[in-house]
Image (cartoon, coloured by chain):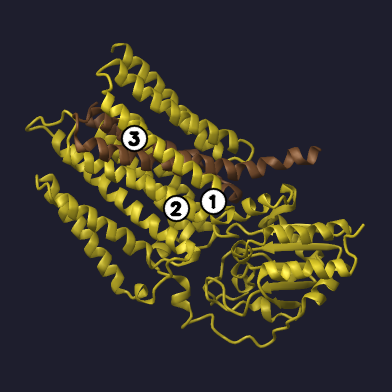
Chain colours: A brown, B yellow
């Protein structure tokens, strides 16, 4: 991939991010932050690439593995904790129907 | 393009689309939960896309598989464990910790890519080696700041770290500038081929993260976490340049930009600018000496019994929960009190200030956890006109958000901040541990008003006493 096309990707991705959330109700600030935070763990892809491309017995394997661990801690934990928060909101209506 | 390329291309496109829809959906109450699951699915998809691409092309060595499995298992397991165990009240520091680990991941992968290059870059004379080193440096710089800043933020929210007085001196800006300049110099050395300067870059940017976060006061912490969250997106995007992954760049850029918007929204809710949060230092440290001081002259304190008697006679009660309630973990006890009142036919509503709790929206989560019906939570704009028709307001561990100074006193640092007009109600009870000031360190004029009574004590203790008193009065016993 050419560097300049990667820059285009960066620019358009940033613009998309700016447009995605316009008005957020305060209720959702914490869950949104937590969810976006989980997505930032996407750097796990970089860690995976490093591990896959590493030479045999290279220390890069270990560095990549630790990096992958940190990233997945971020991703998996982040999504679960966001879900826990959001579950508390969606629980209400079902309860009222009883 | 051969088959693995096409498959990866399609999967990546789909993952980006789903991630964008996920972030969008997370900003709407109705779709939030599904959106979160959608985003998680998109992440899984992106991993599958990556693995299948390498399986179809170069293959994945057994040794790599082993390290992948070890890393993923340990990381996911610990992450899940923490996510399931942590109490709702500690949500802000949990998000900070997760965020810091994301930054650490980008930092490590960049160090790895620098020390043990795995990309076919070195085309002498072209721009590529430069770009490679530059993206590695950005990834290290932002990743290290995100990590150390988040860890400091977490420690402060946990109460492990306070805001030391010496961090408030103006010289801290100078120190931080030194860290910043050192990072820049080591960056220049690094791209000109000096390998060992990478460690200087790591150290300087880590210290910069600490130096910038440490002086910031507790109330501003959520804004900082949101900003650091945005940084971790940028770090991920930089890592995307290192490993040449468009998906990583788009996702990182999206999180970075969306995080920035969220930070802005949060700042607005607190009536602070991002600049003053970052460089103004702790608000309380500035203001205790200048404005906002002054003694209370007309404090009325009352017993829990009196409070219970007034509540019993009320028709309409508004509860204003705040940080203190979250700290005391009294949301369940509060729910019991309001249940009793409701059984007695008293209308109960919760007034939620945009920044109530320890983080915007945090109070909603806490009250939802305590089974408070969603319809009873009212936002500031909706509830403010209702205060004059209200008999009793219970202020629980909130302070600055109910300070009338924000409306009346132009000289007050709080002036202009949206507040709840609790003083319009017939009677206001403020349940508070002592006369200490709120985050802003500013005197609360509300406490001096004739219709305000203070009930001193820990929120949880007072509320459980209140339950006892209400029981004695026969409230809610059917």
Find out whether the residues at labels 2 and 3 contact each other: C-beta distance under 8 Å. no
Q: Chain of mark 1?
A: B
Of residues B131 and B328, the one nearer the viewer is: B328
Outermost residue on the right side: it is: B478
Expressed as whole percent of the image width and height from the top left, the position of residue B250 reads: 37, 34
Indicate which label's residue lies in the foreground, 1 or 2.
Answer: 1
Mark 3 or 1, nearer chain start: 1
> Rounded to the nearest whole Å, what is the CA distance between mark 3 and mark 1?
31 Å
> Rounded to the nearest whole Å, what is the CA distance between mark 1 and mark 2?
13 Å
Mark 2 or 3, nearer chain start: 2
Q: Which residue is mark 3?
A: B249
Q: Which residue is mark 2?
A: B96
The answer to whether residue A57 is above or below residue B387 is above
Residue at 51% across, 34% down: B22
Q: Chain of mark 2?
A: B
> Rounded to the nearest whole Å, what is the CA distance between mark 2 and mark 3?
22 Å
Q: Residues within 10 Å of mark 1 (few under 14, many from 20)?
A: few
Q: Which residue is mark 1?
A: B86
Q: Chain of mark 3?
A: B
Helix or strand or loop: what does disc 2 sit on? helix
The answer to whether residue B443 is above or below residue B55 is below
Residue B173 position by quadrant: bottom left
**For the residues tagged 1 and 2, is the chain the same?**
yes
Residue at 54% across, 56% down: B90
User: On the picture, is B10 further left or further right than B21?
Assistant: left
Indicate which label's residue lies in the foreground, 2 or 3.
Answer: 2
């Amino acid at each position: 991939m050419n560097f300049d096309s990667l820059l285009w990707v960066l620019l358009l991705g940033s613009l998309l991010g700016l447009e995605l959330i316009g008005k957020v109700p305060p209720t959702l600030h914490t869950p949104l932050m937590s969810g976006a935070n989980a997505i930032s763990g996407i750097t796990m892809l970089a860690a995976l690439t490093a591990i896959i491309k590493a030479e045999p017995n290279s220390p890069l394997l270990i560095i990549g593995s630790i990096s992958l661990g940190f990233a997945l801690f971020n991703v998996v934990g982040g999504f679960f904790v966001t879900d826990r928060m959001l579950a508390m909101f969606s629980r209400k209506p079902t309860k009222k129907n009883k | 393009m051969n088959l693995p390329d096409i498959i990866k291309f399609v999967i990546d496109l789909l993952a980006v689309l789903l991630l964008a829809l996920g972030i969008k959906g997370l900003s709407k109450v109705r779709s939030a939960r599904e959106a979160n699951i959608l985003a998680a699915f998109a992440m899984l998809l992106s991993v599958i896309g990556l693995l299948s691409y390498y399986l179809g092309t170069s293959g994945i060595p057994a040794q790599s598989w082993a390290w992948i499995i070890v890393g993923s298992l340990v990381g996911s397991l610990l992450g899940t464990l923490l996510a399931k165990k942590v109490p709702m009240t500690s949500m802000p520091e949990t998000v900070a910790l997760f965020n810091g680990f994301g930054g650490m991941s980008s930092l490590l992968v960049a160090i790895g890519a620098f020390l043990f290059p795995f990309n076919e870059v070195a085309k002498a004379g072209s721009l590529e080696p430069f770009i490679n080193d530059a993206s590695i440096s950005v990834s290290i710089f932002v990743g290290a700041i995100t990590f150390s800043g988040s860890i400091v933020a977490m420690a402060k929210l946990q109460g492990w770290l306070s805001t030391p007085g010496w961090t408030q001196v103006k010289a801290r800006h100078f120190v931080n500038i030194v860290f910043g300049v050192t990072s820049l110099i080591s960056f220049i050395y690094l791209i000109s081929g000096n390998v060992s300067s990478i460690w200087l870059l790591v150290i300087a940017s880590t210290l910069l993260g600490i130096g910038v976060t440490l002086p910031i006061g507790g109330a501003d912490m959520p804004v900082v976490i949101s900003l650091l969250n945005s940084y971790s997106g940028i770090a991920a995007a930089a890592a995307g340049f290192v490993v040449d992954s468009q998906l990583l760049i788009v996702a990182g850029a999206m999180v970075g930009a969306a995080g920035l918007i969220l930070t802005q929204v949060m700042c607005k809710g607190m009536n602070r600018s991002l600049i003053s949060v970052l460089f103004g230092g702790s608000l309380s440290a500035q203001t205790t000496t200048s404005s906002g001081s002054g003694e209370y002259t007309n404090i009325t304190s009352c017993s829990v019994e009196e409070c219970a008697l007034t509540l019993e006679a009320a028709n309409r009660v508004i509860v204003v929960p705040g940080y203190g309630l979250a700290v005391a973990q009294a949301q369940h006890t509060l729910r019991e009190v309001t249940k009793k009142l409701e059984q007695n036919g008293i209308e109960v509503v919760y007034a939620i200030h945009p920044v109530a709790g320890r983080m915007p929206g945090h109070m909603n989560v806490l009250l939802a956890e305590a089974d408070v019906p969603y319809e009873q939570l009212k936002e500031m704009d909706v509830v403010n006109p209702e205060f004059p028709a209200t008999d009793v307001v219970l202020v629980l561990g909130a302070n600055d958000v109910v300070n009338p100074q924000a409306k009346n006193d132009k000289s007050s640092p709080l002036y202009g901040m949206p507040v709840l007009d609790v003083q319009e109600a017939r009677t206001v009870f403020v349940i508070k541990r002592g006369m200490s000031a709120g985050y802003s360190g500013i005197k609360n004029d509300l406490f001096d008003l004739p219709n305000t009574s203070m009930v001193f004590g820990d929120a949880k203790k007072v509320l459980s006493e209140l339950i006892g008193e209400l029981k004695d009065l026969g409230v809610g016993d059917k």
